Image: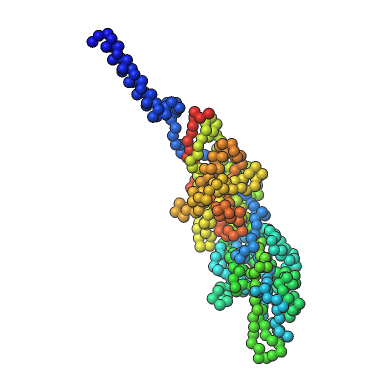
């Protein structure tokens, strides 16, 4: 082969090799990405968690709706809880100029409240029901909390050991009322012109079992009652005093209607038989509570407590590189040794994980704000694994991006649905969760993410 031909062959091979490498670089993207940049998915479940229990019931609103709670329970872990009811009554069907005849004579009077069947504690324990007349009018549209008080008479119009009885086919709590008070309602027609006049004269009732004597841990019960039932209200049984042949008649003053106002007053007594660890957390300093929270944290009924959670070192993920969060799961586990599931004490069907802002105020996480996919966000109780799982990847991503601060989270006994997560007064069940050093029920924060070490 001539010298010219050898040079030509070498030149062709050089051109072919150069074109092949350029083509490979374009396919693999090596023209924009360094060859030693190995992007991959990282999964870790060793992120540090700090948590403890807080007492918060003074800020919990009680809503003006049909279901209210009444009773007393000596919880073996959470101490004593008393649920009382403030309620007014209305002339049924907004009748006007009501008259019971020329000479109505009272036979008897009773408060009746329908019991649909949900309760916590020992329902066989007898409770003492006291009924007081209100001297302060209940105001429609007012925001009452579970710690609100209204002025009431010191004397009672009923003080009995309450019993459940049938009214028709419905099981109800029946409380007999003092005769003279009910007779006055029956005969004073000037107060029966309309509901406004009636409620100015009779401002309502305070119904409580707080004076019940409870015995061993677990005694006493709190029941859920339906005040909107057609049988719930004040029944007056009477006859015409001018005629011996008149049959007995009944009139119902209802708890329901456009003018109905009712709310729960809740008292939690953590001194009376509560877990020492729980009491120490809600009454001590934050540093002391964090140490106590290493074993267990506690979510009480009716918004009595919440759990404060810190992820103190989460920003270390972005100390030198950008991070993209794929999933950020907080897994909290029920301590069913400390608090076993029983017919007396079940677990909440779901919980909610929300944000603590710089002022300590509760806010929704972005995973609740930016999506309707609450299946992904989670919060429902898993009865098989005995745990609650929350995915807050949007919130964690914003923290790592520096868009929001990292002031911690609140785990609350509430629905995870963003539209009703603020509500706590209807949560009758409670739960004990494992703390950060609990050998069997330790919580886990599981992160799935990608690091970009060459991203600038």
Image-based side of 115 in relation to 451, left or right? right
Total marks shown come to 0
Name the residue: 73% across, 85% down. Answer: 102
Name the residue: 44% across, 54% down. Answer: 384
The way the protein has been coloured in the rendering is rainbow
Query: What is the x, y in percent for residue 210?
Result: 66, 64
Name the residue: 46% across, 39% down. Answer: 43
Q: Front-most of 51 and 184? A: 184
Residue 304, compared with residue 260, is above or below; it is: above
Image-based side of 415 in relation to 209, left or right? left
Q: Front-most of 293 and 420? A: 420
Q: Residue furthest top?
A: 3
Query: What is the x, y in percent for residue 317?
Result: 53, 34
Name the residue: 59% across, 67% down. Answer: 225
Image-based side of 262 in relation to 311, left or right? right
Identify the image quadrant of the N terminus.
top left
Q: Front-most of 126 and 378? A: 378
Residue 343, compared with residue 313, is above or below; it is: below
Image-based side of 454 in relation to 249, left or right? left
Say whether residue 51 is visible.
no
Residue 294, compared with residue 230, is above or below; it is: above
Query: What is the x, y in percent for residue 356?
Result: 61, 45
Residue 105, compared with residue 232, is above or below; it is: below
Say whether residue 417 is visible.
yes
Query: What is the x, y in percent for residue 13?
Result: 31, 18
């Amino acid at each position: 082969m001539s010298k010219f031909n050898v040079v030509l062959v070498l030149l062709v091979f050089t051109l072919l090799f150069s074109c092949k490498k350029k083509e490979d670089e374009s396919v693999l993207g090596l023209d924009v990405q360094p060859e030693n940049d190995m992007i991959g998915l990282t999964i870790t479940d060793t992120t540090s968690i700090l948590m403890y229990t807080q007492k918060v019931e003074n800020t919990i609103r009680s809503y003006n709706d049909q279901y209210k709670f009444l009773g007393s329970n000596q919880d073996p872990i959470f101490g004593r809880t008393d649920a009382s009811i403030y309620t007014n009554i209305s002339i049924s069907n907004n009748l006007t100029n009501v008259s019971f005849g020329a000479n109505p004579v009272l036979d008897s009077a009773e408060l009746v409240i329908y019991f649909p069947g949900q309760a916590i504690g020992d329902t066989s324990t007898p409770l003492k029901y006291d009924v007081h007349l209100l001297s302060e009018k209940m105001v429609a549209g007012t925001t009452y909390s579970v710690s609100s008080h209204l002025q009431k008479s010191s004397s009672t119009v009923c003080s009995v050991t309450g019993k459940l009885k049938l009214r028709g086919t419905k099981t109800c709590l029946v409380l007999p009322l003092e005769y003279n008070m009910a007779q006055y309602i029956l005969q004073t027609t000037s107060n029966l012109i309309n509901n406004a006049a009636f409620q100015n004269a009779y401002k309502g009732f305070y119904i409580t079992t707080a004076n019940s004597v409870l015995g061993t841990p677990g005694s006493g019960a709190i029941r859920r009652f339906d005040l909107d039932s057609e049988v719930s209200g004040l029944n007056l049984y009477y006859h015409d005093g001018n005629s011996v042949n008149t049959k007995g008649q009944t009139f119902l003053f209802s708890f329901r209607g456009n003018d109905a106002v009712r709310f729960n007053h809740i008292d939690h007594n953590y001194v009376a038989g509560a877990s020492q660890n729980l009491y120490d957390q809600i009454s001590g300093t934050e540093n002391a509570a964090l140490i106590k929270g290493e074993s267990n944290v506690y979510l009480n009924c009716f918004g009595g407590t919440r759990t404060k959670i810190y992820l103190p070192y989460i920003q270390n993920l972005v100390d030198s590189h950008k991070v993209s969060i794929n999933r950020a799961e907080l897994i909290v586990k029920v301590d069913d040794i400390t608090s076993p599931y029983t017919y007396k004490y079940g677990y909440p069907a779901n919980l909610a994980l929300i944000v603590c802002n710089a002022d300590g105020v509760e806010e929704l996480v972005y995973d609740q704000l930016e999506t309707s996919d609450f299946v992904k966000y989670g919060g429902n109780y898993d009865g098989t694994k005995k745990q609650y799982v929350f995915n807050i990847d949007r919130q964690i991503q914003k923290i790592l991006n520096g868009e929001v601060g990292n002031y911690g989270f609140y785990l609350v006994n509430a629905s995870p649905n963003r539209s009703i997560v603020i509500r706590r007064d209807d949560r009758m069940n409670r739960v004990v969760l494992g703390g950060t050093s609990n050998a069997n029920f330790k919580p886990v924060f599981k992160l799935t993410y990608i690091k970009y070490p060459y991203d600038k």
